[in-house]
């Protein structure tokens, strides 16, 4: 059976999991970490860095280190969220050729799916290192409240990374899957998912027969830990400006140091009630004096700074419960997902709103990735050991624009997917031979306030008086939440359709070019890893031989044979050192056998004498 991995592509961190012998496990990266920062950087020499290594150099390379790309994926250049990011991020966000937003690192402009693909590719490599085989298929999670553009852009990111995304699954649903998998339970649960960049709340029914049914979902794709960090950054910047008259937002390196400090302080305040933010030499004054930032942040201050953000999550919960037509007493478990749910005030507000303590049985950083791996294994399972049914919903109302600029809904919010709905419309002018169908997603009655997913024109309608030609519009949503729309002239059967796939901001040619670049990177990365392994092995053997030299010389110094062996050993080590300095990996690889033989001989001599 082909392996399918599950990837939680997070705003702050990403995580990869796989099902082994019926048990889902999170795969640790080479550093032993089960989560990898969703950060990408390009060095001065043009080298790409992903994950922990990118995070470690972020302060000194702030302009070329990208974080929280997920908040920008699938968004238009002129959206308020992109404008907000431009003002607060130290890296360069620029306008793309298709009205999308892109990121400039060094002298190259990258699309957001391309940046996300770098993170996905890193998770793919982590999984392949662990499993010892190539991985092609993946289930990727997205926030439940992602719209169609954002979902499509995520699928594009998977394709660029060389992965076949066999299913896009909503993060809260994935968490519920991991929570209920193999437990044989009948429960109604709420998944409260507050991560690094997004917030979701989903109400689900889990049945012992293996059915996971989402009743309602809502969220905010621009509400998460990034916003909590930003409040702390603003507090630090405003305090510093009041004291020194200098706005630290103008200095990109200072801004990155502030971001790191804010995130660290926020995390610390989940365990302690106060912490000191201490950033020496943060900037120089006009008189060239080194200025320091030192402030005490208390948990109470943090809660005050972020009270409205937490209130917003509770308001969305209230809305979702109302749409599910459920009382709080009908919920049997509240599952907390996402790093921000570690904040004591968040837990307190959740407990107060739902009138019960949240469930402590899931890992907030790992549960989404685990659920994705379960879904992946179930999709390719031929033994029926992992039989289960996932019934998710569309998070947004779908419809078209009608005369007067109004939004006519075809598929209401929280409709179970996959689904299909049709509705008849009539022409609005005499002898009208074509209709333009604008496909929209959103909750406003005014069409212009909703997200435009795509548009197409149905031509060749018969000439007739106003209202005499009937056009049937059909919306279909597949299991990934991807939308397709058909329109046909009821009388003639003439039809036109659109699958909403071209709205991620990338053309098919661009995606193919990016796939080639990503594939080249993977090959180079593998070669670099192999070279590094040879280098490390050689350095270890040289160090071990040199450590044994004094003892061996003392033991064999009296014989001609011994002196000859010592000279040969020195020649092997000197040659290996020269190859190391030249970076001649092929030569060094050939020399490993001689180094190994010398090391074994030295150990044998010392061992016999002992």
Image: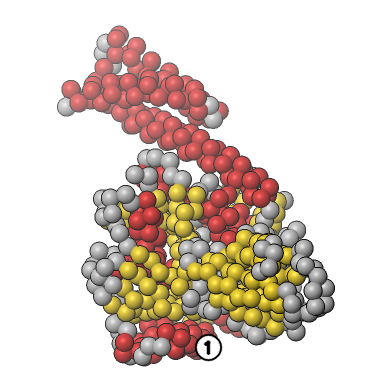
Residue 509 spot, x, y in % from top left: 68, 47
- Please indicate, yes or no, whether residue 540 appears anywhere in the rendered image: yes
Residue at image x 34%, y 76%?
Answer: 205
- Residue placed at 81% from the left, 70% from the top? 463
Quadrant assignment for the C terminus = top left
Is label 1 in a helix, a strand or a loop?
A: helix
Q: Seen in the image, is 505 located left or right of residue 122?
A: right
Vertical side of 504 occupied by 187: above or below? below
Q: Nearer the viewer, residue 229 or 520?
A: 520
Looking at the image, can residue 223 be seen? no
Residue 77 in the image: x percent, y percent?
71, 68
Whole-percent x, y for residue 333 in the image = 30, 80
Front one among 16 and 563:
16
Instruction: Work out which quarter of the rendered image holds the N terminus and state it.
Output: top left
In the image, residue 263 sits, relative to residue 36, either above or below, namely below
Left or right of 318? Residue 100 is right
State the residue at coordinates (26%, 13%): 558
Q: Relative to 511, does residue 419 appear above or below in the rendering? A: below
Left/right of residue 123 with respect to residue 130 in the rendered view:
right
Identify the image quadrant of residue 441.
bottom right
The local crowd at label 1, few if under 14, some if 14 to 19, many if 20 or more residues have their Cα within 10 Å, is few
Which is nearer the eye, 220 or 609? 220
Report the residue marked by disc 1. Answer: 308
Q: Quadrant of residue 487?
A: bottom right
């Amino acid at each position: 059976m082909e392996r399918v991995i599950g990837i939680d592509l997070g705003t702050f961190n990403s995580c990869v999991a796989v099902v082994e012998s019926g048990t889902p496990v999170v795969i640790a990266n080479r550093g032993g970490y089960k989560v990898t920062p969703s950060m990408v950087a390009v060095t001065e020499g043009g080298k790409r860095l992903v994950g922990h290594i990118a995070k470690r150099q972020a302060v000194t390379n702030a302009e070329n280190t990208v974080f929280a790309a997920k908040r920008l994926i699938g968004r238009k250049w002129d959206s308020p969220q992109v404008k907000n990011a431009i003002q607060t991020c130290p890296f360069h966000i620029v306008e793309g050729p298709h009205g999308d937003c892109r990121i400039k690192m060094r002298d190259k402009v990258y699309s957001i799916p391309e940046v996300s693909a770098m993170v996905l590719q890193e998770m793919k490599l982590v999984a392949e290192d662990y499993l010892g085989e190539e991985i092609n298929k993946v289930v990727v999670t997205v926030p439940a409240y992602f719209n169609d553009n954002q979902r499509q852009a995520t699928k594009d990111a998977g394709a660029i990374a060389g992965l076949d995304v066999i299913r896009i699954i909503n993060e809260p649903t994935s968490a519920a899957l991991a929570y209920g998998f193999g437990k044989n339970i009948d429960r109604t649960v709420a998944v409260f998912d507050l991560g690094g960049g997004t917030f979701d709340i989903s109400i689900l029914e889990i049945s012992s027969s293996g059915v996971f049914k989402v009743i309602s979902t809502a969220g905010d794709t621009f509400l998460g830990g990034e916003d909590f960090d930003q409040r702390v950054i603003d507090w630090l910047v405003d305090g510093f400006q009041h004291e020194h008259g200098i706005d630290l937002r103008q200095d990109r390196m200072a801004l990155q140091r502030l971001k790191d400090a804010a995130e660290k302080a926020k995390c610390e305040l989940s365990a302690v009630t106060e912490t000191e933010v201490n950033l020496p030499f943060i900037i120089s004054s006009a008189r060239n004096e080194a200025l320091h930032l030192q402030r005490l942040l208390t948990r109470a201050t943090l809660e005050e700074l972020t009270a409205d953000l937490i209130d917003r999550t509770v308001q969305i919960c209230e809305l979702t419960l109302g749409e599910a037509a459920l009382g709080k007493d009908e919920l049997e478990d509240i599952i907390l997902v996402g790093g921000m749910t570690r904040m004591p005030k968040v837990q307190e507000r959740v407990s107060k709103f739902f009138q019960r303590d949240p469930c402590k049985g899931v890992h907030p950083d790992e549960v989404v990735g685990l659920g994705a791996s379960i879904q992946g294994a179930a999709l390719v399972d031929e033994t029926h050991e992992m039989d289960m049914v996932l019934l998710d919903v569309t998070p947004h109302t779908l419809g078209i624009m009608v005369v007067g600029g109004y939004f006519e809904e075809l598929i209401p919010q929280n409709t179970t997917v996959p689904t299909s709905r049709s509705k008849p419309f009539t022409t609005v002018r005499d002898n009208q031979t074509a209709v333009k169908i604008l496909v929209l997603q959103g909750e406003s009655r005014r069409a212009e306030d909703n997200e435009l997913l795509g548009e197409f024109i149905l031509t060749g309608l018969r000439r007739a008086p106003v209202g005499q030609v009937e056009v049937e519009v059909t919306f279909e949503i597949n299991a990934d939440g991807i939308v397709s729309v058909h329109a046909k002239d009821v009388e003639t059967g003439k039809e036109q359709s659109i699958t909403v796939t071209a709205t991620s901001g990338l053309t098919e040619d661009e995606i193919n070019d990016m796939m080639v670049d990503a594939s080249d990177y993977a090959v180079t990365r593998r070669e670099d890893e192999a070279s590094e392994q040879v280098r490390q092995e050689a350095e270890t053997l040289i160090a071990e031989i040199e450590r044994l030299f004094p003892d061996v010389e003392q033991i064999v110094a009296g014989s001609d044979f011994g002196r000859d062996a010592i000279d040969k050993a020195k020649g092997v080590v000197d040659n290996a050192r020269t190859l190391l300095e030249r970076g001649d990996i092929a030569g060094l690889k050939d020399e490993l056998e001689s180094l190994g033989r010398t090391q074994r001989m030295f150990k044998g001599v010392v061992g016999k004498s002992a």
